[in-house]
Image: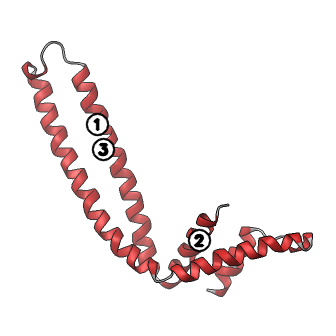
């Protein structure tokens, strides 16, 4: 477990408790961006396979030209959706930034608890235990 992942998990828990609608929007946007990136890769692969299947001049093959036009239009739509979701994600990040201090403190507290193991082996705490207690407090 890295300090960044600890902070990210704490931020997600805080956001779920304080602003569940923002957390849902954030998760939905991340999923949408992932799907859009996959769609872009698929369009690129389609374009490359269409070009590689051409026999002779690319410009003489009407299938390739019309297929490229369709792929370009679809690609432009996907790029537009990615841009719109990026704008919304910026708004979400602005809300998330309000809880950055608390999530950083949670990360530091977990690291401190982890270092207590050097005092005695009974002071070993799992992340599941830590976040379970964190959920109770929030």
Please state if 37 lies on the left or on the right of 12 as rendered: left
Q: Which residue is mark 1?
A: 44
Please state if 104 lies on the left or on the right of 63 as rendered: right
What residue sits 41% from the left and 77% below the top?
22
Where is residue 63, by image quadrant?
Answer: top left
Query: Which of the numbered marks, if any, corresponds to residue 7?
Result: 2
Please provide percent x and percent y for residue 16.
52, 78
Q: Give the structural element (helix, strand or loop) at label 3.
A: helix
Nearest to N terminus: mark 2 or mark 1: 2
Residue farthest to the bottom, as pictured:
137
Tell me the crowding category of disc 2: few under 14, some 14 to 19, or many 20 or more residues within 10 angstroms, Cα based.
many
Cα distance between the residues tagged 3 and 1? 6 Å
Q: Which residue is mark 3?
A: 40
Q: Give the structural element (helix, strand or loop) at label 2.
A: helix
Q: Nearer the viewer, residue 119 or 1?
A: 119
Q: Are marks 3 and 1 in contact (CB under 8 Å)?
A: yes
């Amino acid at each position: 477990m890295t300090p960044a992942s600890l902070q990210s998990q704490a931020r997600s828990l805080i956001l779920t408790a304080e602003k569940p609608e923002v957390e849902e929007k954030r998760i939905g946007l991340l999923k949408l961006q992932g799907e859009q990136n996959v769609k872009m890769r698929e369009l690129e692969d389609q374009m490359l396979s269409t070009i590689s299947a051409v026999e002779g001049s690319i410009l003489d093959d009407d299938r390739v030209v019309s297929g490229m036009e369709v792929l370009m239009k679809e690609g432009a739509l996907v790029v537009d959706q990615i841009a719109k979701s990026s704008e919304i994600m910026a708004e979400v990040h602005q809300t998330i930034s309000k809880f950055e201090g608390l999530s950083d403190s949670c990360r530091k507290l977990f690291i401190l608890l982890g270092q207590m193991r050097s005092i005695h082996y009974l002071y070993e705490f799992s992340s599941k235990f830590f976040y379970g207690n964190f959920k109770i407090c929030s």
